[in-house]
Amino acid sequence: MAQDLRAAMERFSDPSALARWIVGQAGQSLHVALPLGIGKATHVANALFAMAREDPALRLEIMTALTLERPSASSDLQARFLEPFVDRHFAGYVELDYARALRGDGLPDNVAVTEFFLNSGAWLGNARAQQDYVSVNYSAAPRDVILAKPINLLAQLVAVDESGPKPRYSLACNPDVTLDILSELEERRARGAPFLFVGQVNRDLPFMPGSAEIAADRFDALLDDPAVEFPIFAAPRRPVSTAEYVTGLHVASLVEDGGTLQIGIGSMGDAIAYALILRHRHNALFRELLSRITDEPRETEPFEHGLYAASEMFVDGFLELYDAGILKRRSARGPVLHGAFFVGSRGFYTRLKAMDEARRADFDMTAVSFTNALYGDEDEKRADRVHARFVNTVIKADVLGAAQADTLGDGRVISGVGGQHDFVEQALALRGAHSILTVASTRTRDDETSSNIVWQLDRTTIPRHMRDVVVSEYGVAHLKAASDAQCIARMAAISDARFAPELLDTARKAGKIDGNAHVEVERNTPERLEDLLRAPREAGHFAPFPFGSDFTAEEQTALRALTVLREAGSSASALAALAWDGMRHNPDVAERTALRRLGLAGDDGAPGARERLYRLLLCGAWAGLSRTHRP
């Protein structure tokens, strides 16, 4: 049977026909590996799911991670903002039917879906997704999760380059796990086990040369028809807060010229990239701001030698650093970046596709075993990854240096450990490297602000014995080789002034610090941070969206107010105060345009009670933002 499977590559234009062929070749029990993120062969997966739903005798088991969906609203006001944006931004995006089923009536009894990383926060309320989640380091997932199963189908979205005499194919966004499992699965087939490698061509996917390029004869079948192509998932760019910007300034001052960088997706990654560019292009301003938030010696010079990136994720921020002339230090193999997967904004994909192949080759997409571990080619990796700064974000950190990043106290998984532990471990193994964990010092929910720097964590992702550097908007805590008393003092020093005294009191009662120990935290206030950035903002720096926005101007205005409402939550007193402020606030032109975008301008006749309340709350939020000079 193994010989028959390799007879010739089959080509299909109809997903249902391909699904029937797969079942005919592999049998009635399908163990399917789908890449994480945007690399899933969506139409193949949906066609197989449809067959399994119709035929209870067909067993479908899917192993994957990071299933991406259109955002959905949880309230009427949120829907007014979100639904028109989603319809525009995600127009044509094809959802995965197994995800729809998980959110609807549930999976059929003959279908199972296991994920080792969840879309952040998206599955907290879904019992089946929570129960079937597998916790594993990203670098270990290929071996311990995927290859531990009798995988007989790998189905992946692939890019194609048709500029030459024959088409060339690339794993593009997701060589991460595929390169670590494909050879083993092919060897199993050679020993008689059934296995099919199926690609779905999508021309919206940037073609990435180098390690991600794959020979056509390795596919058993290709689904290739423009009728089943679709816009790949584009992550909306998020606004960067004042606290994130200041955290970014701290992180940027820890990065050595000629060093190595890893950052993640989202607003914190954007803040770090922006601060590095500020250091390089507006050095005097960078130095002036840094002098106002620390008296420690830091890295402040522009980047003469530049940086090399070794990062599991290739994100928008790295493209910004590349264009700024910062991401330019070449590895021994030539590229300035090695990444394992990417998910980016629509602009990110457009820029990659617009590059000539020589420039795109500067970003080598490769196996997760290469980016996330030192094992294999270790001497070369160590030579490349000098002065490494691996930056990851956590939701909480305790005063002894442990961190919580992926799981709530009740056991529900927010996302997963992913590669965070991999890079912490790698930093400890590399001479001159540091693991940098960023944490927002506080969080506000239902108008109650609490500290994210705590005495004791609910759950632990990074244990205290792996502590290194923790950064909040209030400073940098160097914890490697520090005593517990030193850790406590340094973590208290980067805490919000409202919560540091309680942390120190608890430590004193436990006998972990001296009774007369004192930590200066009086200046650790949100108001001071706003003051720090006020003048630079007036000069055009530190915009809410530093690298462009997917939201219209009126949506950005609305989003500012909606963020305030999210912090107020269900607090009756906070909502009442906002409504009172709203009665006295006369919206400006931008705010009136935002109200119209939300259907709250009153253009369609007299508004109802609900619409009047929404308008008051939004106006109250804008009034408060104006009063406190928040962007």
Image (spheres, helix red, strand yellow):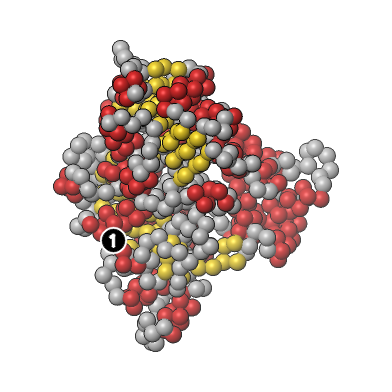
Q: Judge whether residue 257 can be spotted in this image.
A: no
In the displayed structure, 624 sits above or below 348; it is below
Residue at the extreme left of the image, as rendered: 379
Q: Which residue is mark 1?
A: 298
504 or 400: which is nearer to us? 400
Q: Secondary structure at mark 1?
A: loop
Point 32% across, 44% down: residue: 143
> Which residue is pictured at 29% across the width and 57% down the height?
425
Residue at x 34% of width, y 78% of height: 485
Left or right of 259, for residue 87: right
Residue lying furthest right: 606
The location of residue 484, given as percent across then percent down, is: 33, 76
* In the image: residue 353, left or right of residue 554: left
Residue at the (26%, 43%) spot, across then down = 370
In x, y percent, where is residue 403? 40, 63
Residue 203: x, y in percent? 43, 23
Figure check: 427 above or below 96: below
Residue extending farthest to the top is 165
Residue 227 visible: yes
Between 182 and 534, the one nearer to me in the picture: 182
Q: Position of residue 150 (x, y in %)?
A: 38, 38
Residues 183 and 259: in front is 183
